[in-house]
Amino acid sequence: MDSDLELLFPESYIESTRERVRLYRELDEIPDPEALESFANQLVDRFGEMPEQTRELLLVVRLRWLAMDLGIERIQLKNDRMVLYFISDPDSDYYRSPIFSAVLDYVQQNPRRCQMKESINKLTLSFGNIRSVSQAVEILEGMGV
């Protein structure tokens, strides 16, 4: 994921650089929603209420899982826009799958909310007015995975 949003453990929340780095690594390896919830609870227990940047950082994990389920290879969240990049192989079975059909249905039902574009071996889906990871998660959840 590529983003210009502030997604981090602020120094004011976790003072130790070594601890922040360890927690970033641990967060990157979280396998499922239960483990993510446990991780969040441990942060609150150890460091107190999470700042917004940290809540959004934890949502990135959920966003990644949703994106993978939808066949999205890359997400860009910049300049209040979200651009989803689909599997680059145009001959992939993915493009004949029920998952891709659900994405197309979403696009057809929401023509003012998103725009699908195809360029040289790249299929993208763009959304405007996306100012947070939580908004991005909400959109991907709405695609019917």
Image (tube, rainbow, N blue to C red):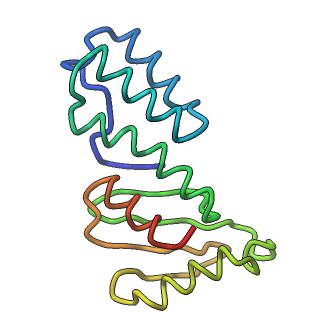
Expressed as whole percent of the image width and height from the top left, the position of residue 65 reads 56, 50
Q: Residue at left 27%, top 40%?
A: 6
Residue 91 figure quarter = bottom right
Residue 53 figure quarter = top left
Q: Residue at left 38%, top 17%?
A: 20
* Along the viewing direction, whichever of 44 and 60 lies nearer the viewer: 44
Expressed as whole percent of the image width and height from the top left, the position of residue 44 reads 29, 23
* Along the viewing direction, whichever of 4 and 72 lies nearer the viewer: 72
Q: Residue at left 49%, top 57%?
A: 75
Expressed as whole percent of the image width and height from the top left, the position of residue 46 reads 31, 14
Q: Quadrant of the C terminus?
A: bottom right
97 left or right of 42 in image: right
- 16 lies above or below 144: above
Expressed as whole percent of the image width and height from the top left, the position of residue 137 reads 41, 58
Residue 139 figure quarter = bottom left
Number of numbered discs overlaid on the protein picture? 0
Q: Residue at left 55%, top 56%?
A: 74
135 left or right of 117 in image: left
